[in-house]
Amino acid sequence: MLLKPLLRHAFLLLAALLAGRSTAQHGTPDHGGDHAGPAAAEAHAGAPAAKFNAGDLIMGHVGDEHGWHLWGHTSLPLPVILYNSERGLSVFSSARFDHGHRTYGGYALHEGMVVAVNAPDGTDAHQAVVDQRLTEATLDLSITKNVATMIVVSALLLWVFISVARAYGRRAGQAPTGLQNLVEPIILFVRDDVAKSAIGHKYEKYLPYLLTAFFFIFFGNLLGLVPFFPGGANLTGNIAVTGVLALITFIIVTVNGNRHYWQHIFAMPGVPGWVLAILTPVEVLGMFLKPFVLMIRLFANITAGHIIALSFYSLIFVFGETSAGAGYGVAIGSWAFTVFMFMLELLVAFIQAYVFTFLSAMYIGAAVEEPHHH
């Protein structure tokens, strides 16, 4: 069984993804303040109702946040973990920020990102002055919605494969049933049509990683389509996540590349020297373009699907602001397109997991391929 290597690769993948997320949180917008709580609703009770903003809705969904919106004004707070070189370690619940309206512990949410402020706890975050020097010295290691989703996906992977492995142990030599019956064809597909076809006889060494990457992306894509907790996060549409996945593939290719592979990059046999002066820089550039393409392809396809589906959904409210009749009239077509996009995204969830895994297998296969002697 490949269970132990698979679990080891799953753990290493999760650790790398968590590291990638922690470094990206400084520059990734978080929309934790989009869902105003009761206190904020009371404070703005006398203000005129704001118009529906489709852009805020869409970007609030595809972005990350320091809380998990459940319904209405209800959100699930998540741990905020900050380390500042002067203030030390700070750990508290994101509920302390009151959906981005209050300061706590010398920090506040500003445009979705945690910033350091010089203000007492409970100060209106919009009035607090940001301390840029302390903000730059703050490392955000918080469990955001995307990080929590990674943990959920990893737990699902462990549950599925441990259950299947135990079932094989109990029913050795018998036909698979239940969860085995569902998972086995996908595993065989990845093994036979992806790993074997792209890597060749050395595929077994890399199969645990390919299976882990495939199911991690596939489960993450499917959870992103679930409109309620614990779904709804745009995990594989986060460029930090796809970047770390692509980086892992790049490291595997670079570390396992044989002499034949490196020779074709730096000094392709049979090519004149003046051509090598042009070809070698192109080949070296291609080494870095391959993981870049992996990162952008997955990120762009998943994010685009979410944006298109939410755009159709938003048309109901955009037209509804003009008149109730227009809103109801557009609702039928809008819902039809939204459902169509949802069904299409189910197919895309599998296709994008397959494409990432297949391209990774092709890159690995090219790195470990033995020279052909004629």
Image (cartoon, rainbow, N blue to C red):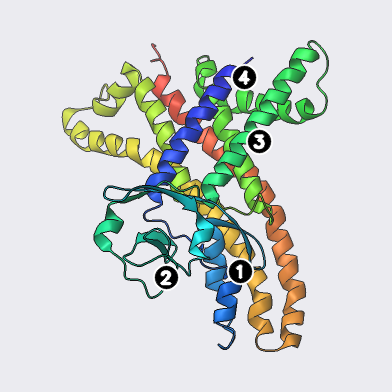
Mark closer to the observer (2, 4): 2
Q: Residue furthest front?
A: 120
Residue wearing tag 3: 156
Observer-side mark, 1 or 3, equals: 3
Question: Which-is-in-front pick, marks 4 and 3?
Answer: 3
Where residue 79 sits in the image (x, y, percent)? 51, 49
Q: Label 1 vs label 3: CA separation?
A: 30 Å
Q: What type is the residue that disc 2 sits on?
A: Ala
The answer, for residue 65, to whether it is visible in the render is no
Of label 1 and label 4, which has the lower sequence position? 4
Badge 1: few (under 14), some or many (20 or more) residues near its Cα, within 10 Å? some
Please tell me the numbered disc located at residue 311: 1
Distance of label 1 from label 4 (alpha carbons): 42 Å
Circle 2: element type: loop
**Label 2, label 3: how far apart the Cα atoms are:** 37 Å
Q: Nearer the viewer, mark 2 or mark 3?
A: 2
Residue bearing mark 4: 3
Location of mark 2 (residue)? 125
Q: Quadrant of the C terminus?
A: top left
Instruction: Please tell me whether residue 271 is drawn above or below residue 138 in the rendered image.
Output: above
**Left or right: where 116 falls relative to 318:** left
Q: Considering depth in this image, is 218 or 45 the residue closer to the camera?
A: 45
In whole angstroms, how far apart are the C-alphas of marks 2 and 4? 49 Å
Q: Earlier in the sequence, mark 2 or mark 4?
A: 4
Answer with left or right where residue 44 lies relative to residue 24.
right
| Picture quadrant of residue 119 | bottom left
Q: Are marks 1 and 3 in contact (CB under 8 Å)?
A: no
Percent of width and height locating residue 139: 34, 48
